[in-house]
Every structure is written in structure tokens, then in C-alpha cells.
Amino acid sequence: QVQLVESGGGLVQAGGSLRLSCVASGRTFSSFAMGWFRQAPGKEREFVATISWGGGTTNYADSVKGRVTISRDNRVNTVYLQMNSLKPEDTAVYYCAAKESYRTSLSRPEQYDYWGQGTQVTVSS
């Protein structure tokens, strides 16, 4: 089992920045591909970004490309999502997800086995 705990969400004005963190425990973090997803009220969960086990490969949704950076530090079992130039449409609950895999570019929710509880991001206009 893997436990994932997100933090860093909050209320920010449009154009602002937030950095989300997700700390993993329970298994060898460096063997997991990690992803960030988000879900707005009334909408399906959507892909935001993913990073491979070693951090060498990243992939982003078109809606956030150029504004968001995913990174990881395997020494502290943490994956980050740096979000800049935030827009009201970025408002959602953001979830961290993990998949024990050396595959890259995992962008579908069903590809992941473990999920955090989510952290709310609200962007005001």
C-alpha cells in the first residue's frame, strides 16, 4: 500500500502562484510514476501532469502547459506541482496519484493505483 498526502492548496488571485506537494509513504517511492489530476464541481477528473519514476520524463495537459511544472524529490518521497499564472478555470480539487511502473506519460486516471485525498485550489478573478 501507498499513502499519499497532498498539501499546498488554497485561495489565490488570478495570475498568482501555488506549489502543491504530495508526500508518499509505504513503498519505495522511486519505483512509482506520479501524476497530478484535478476535478472541478460537476466535471470529470482530468489529467494535469505526470512524471516518471526518476523524474526524467514529464508530460502536461495542454490546458496547463507553460504554466505548470511537475517535479519530484525521491530523497524525501515528494512530488510537487508548481502552478503559475493561475486562472479561475484552474479552480478544482487537485489529486496526487501513484502507479508502480517504469512507464512514462501515464495520463489516464484508470492507470493509477493510489490516490491522495485531494487539496482544494481556488482562483479568484
Image: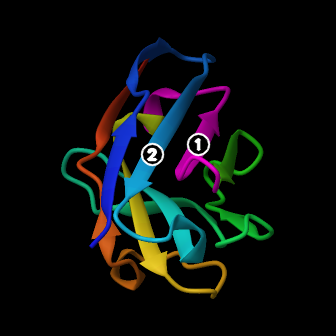
Segment tinted magenta in the rendering: 74-89
Relative vertical location of residue 15 with respect to residue 59 in this rendering, above or below = above
Q: Which mark is residue 119?
A: none
Q: Within the image, what quadrant is residue 18 found in?
A: top right
Nearer-the-camera pick, 79 or 17: 79
Cβ atoms at labels 2 and 1 below 8 Å apart: yes
- Give the left or right position of residue 75, taking residue 111 as reference: right
Q: Which residue is identified by label 2?
A: 22
Front: mark 2 or 1:
2
How many numbered discs, if any?
Answer: 2
Name the amino acid, label 1: Leu
Relative vertical location of residue 4 with respect to residue 10 in this rendering, above or below = below
Relative vertical location of residue 101 with respect to residue 93 in this rendering, above or below = below
What element does badge 1 sit on? strand
Nearer-the-camera pick, 49 or 22: 22
Q: Which mark is residue 81?
A: 1
